[in-house]
Image (spheres, rainbow, N blue to C red):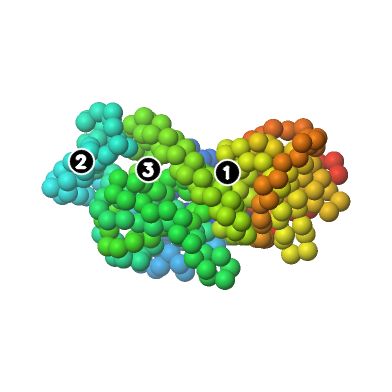
Amino acid sequence: MFQIHAVCDEDKGCPLYRREARLEFSPPTVSGVDGLPVCAIAVENLQKVIPRLQAGQPASAFAHTYCGGCPAGKSWWTFQPVSQETEASASPAASQFILNSISKMKMFTGVHMAKLMRIARLIKGTRVPAGRPLITRGKHGDAFFIVLEGECEVVQQDDNQVESTLATLPAGECFGEMSLITGEPASATVRAKGDVTVLAVSKENFNQMLGIAPEIAITLARILANRLARTGRWVIDELKKGIIGRLELIPPGELIQAMNVNGQTGMLIVQNADKALQMYLHDGQVHEVKMGEKDGEEAFFEFMGWARGNFRFEPVRREQSVKQVSMDTVGMLLEGMRRVDEFRQTGVWRKPEGGAPPPQA
């Protein structure tokens, strides 16, 4: 059966859809992916494209298709053919090879063999040549990967194209789950270090895999926690070297989180164009924040939206430090990320008393 997904790539006040929302067209039926409601106005306009795609026209010819709009809002959509993965799509030998491989991996420890047999049918083995990216920073991920043979490397580039290697992923390591779970673009590029073999689970099959074996989600949570701890140690090691860092490589949220987890005490100084921020942390807790005439929580929240800038950390301890903020640091991080995410989705920066301008690009 012909299937194609219409994927929302922009919304302005739409009451039903946000970016990455999906509608599945399987003529003559239309349904919302993951339980999303179906908008009659959008379907009436989007379904006009489906016969053309069935006739062989490329999906790229219909990028950014307008939904038609309504008094409440508007949205724009692109189209993606859906790969028809069936239980018979892989040969018995290939399925058995994948089953043998995943049954030995820590990630699938404790998963019953009957579940593993079903999961194996959702996975495709792929050989990737050296240097080819599997995930690209700034783009939404479309698959979850497990390294089977060889190594992948996690890299980032700043505005001057200076590249840094953040981690090397050997056989058994996985990546790509964060973008699938959160819907956020990937924060780093992952590419093949040499020729590698990976096991790939598509975005649609990833959710199905977790439905088959919910215990995998617990293992993924542990993997993410360990990864965060490693990233935090790396950030602190760099700061202790006295290296001036860049927010393009370490976003504000990750930077403050690393300092909080590792209980750092000192002054963080950040320069972004004509704006400067000073933040004093005591044993990992934010005590003081100053940005021009702003201070406290609102200065912190504005900083969370910065996408670029230089920073340095001075390990100094103040014996008489008065805590200027009332919120716990973890609470401020969560609230700051929520505000930035809200701004990205709506284009409106929520202004509490005193206000704060939108995050800087």
Q: Is residue 329 left or right of residue 100?
A: right
Residue 96 visible here: yes
Q: Is residue 273 left or right of residue 251?
A: right
Residue visible at 18% across and 41% down in the picture = 100
Q: Nearer the viewer, mark 2 or mark 3?
A: 2
Residue 129, by quadrant, is: bottom left
Q: Give the percent coordinates (x, y) of residue 270.
A: 71, 56
- Decide which of 38, 170 is in the foreground and name it: 170
Compared with 297, 215 (above or below) is above
Residue 195, by quadrant, is: bottom left
- Decide which of 221, 353 is in the foreground and name it: 221
What numbered label is drawn on residue 99? 2
Give amino acid for label 3. Phe
Lower sequence index among marks 3 and 1? 3
Q: Give the percent coordinates (x, y) of residue 103.
A: 22, 37
Compared with 330, 299 (above or below) is below
Helix, strand or loop at disc 3?
A: helix
